[in-house]
Image: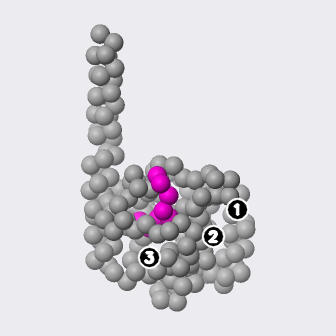
Amino acid sequence: KKGVRTLLEALPQVIAHHSEARLTVAGSGPMEEELKDLAAKLGLTDKVNFLGMVAQSDLPGLYSRAALAVFPFIVAKSGDQEGFGLVQVEAMGCECPVITGDLPAIHDIITHEETGLIFPSGNTQALADAINGLLKNRDLRLRLAQEARRQVVKKYDWEVIAKKYMSVYEKLIADEG
């Protein structure tokens, strides 16, 4: 459901236009060896770095150094899919431009061409086009990243969340009385 296969399959088209491009894959899972094999089969061994599990505290540094963050989520064969995309919120909070697969929960976080780019899930060509377009358009990357951070702070800052919880608790208490 993470869609890393789609991203790896799009990468040769990205490298054809941006030879300096590199992919860093953070995280681990049951498909890790299969994905490493696919990267090798596609001739991407020197272009892809599989980090494995990454400490939560290390993610802001990764996002801050990245040109963009790609979350190519898909619906798994079982029907399983990503829910609320906290990783996207984290990337956006670090002012890292985001590209993501189009799943229902994504629209709660990202507005296409305003706070990130959304591509049809599983569509390798659309993903390659989105990455290439964003890599060549620095102004768009900056605009998306800045608006995304502004929205994240407005909606997901801990003080904002705490006030929302307080409001719910106050309403429950008032209803009990």
Task: Return the x and y of residue 63 as percentages of the image width and height.
Answer: 43, 63
Residue 5 circle label:
2
Q: Is residue 169 magenta?
A: no
CA gap between label 3 and label 1 equals 25 Å
Q: Please state the extent of the stretch shown in magenta in the rendering.
A: 98-105
- For the C terminus, which image quadrant? top left
CA gap between label 2 and label 3 equals 16 Å
The disc labelled 2 sits on which kind of residue?
A: Arg
- Where disc 3 sits, the SS reads helix
Q: Are marks 2 and 1 in contact (CB under 8 Å)?
A: yes
Residue at image point 50% right, 58% down: 103
Q: Are marks 3 and 1 in contact (CB under 8 Å)?
A: no
- For the N terminus, which image quadrant? bottom right
Q: Residues within 10 Å of mark 2 (few under 14, many from 20)?
A: some
- Where disc 1 sits, the SS reads loop
Dot 2 or dot 1: first in sequence order is 2
Dot 2 or dot 3: first in sequence order is 2
The disc labelled 1 sits on which kind of residue?
A: Met
Asked whether, in this view, residue 9 is left or right of residue 159, the answer is right
Residue 31 circle label:
1
Dot 3 or dot 1: first in sequence order is 1
Position of 83 relative to 102 (above/below):
above
Q: Residue furthest top?
A: 177
Q: Residues within 10 Å of mark 3 (few under 14, many from 20)?
A: some
Q: Which residue is mark 3?
A: 130
Q: Nearer the viewer, mark 3 or mark 1?
A: 3
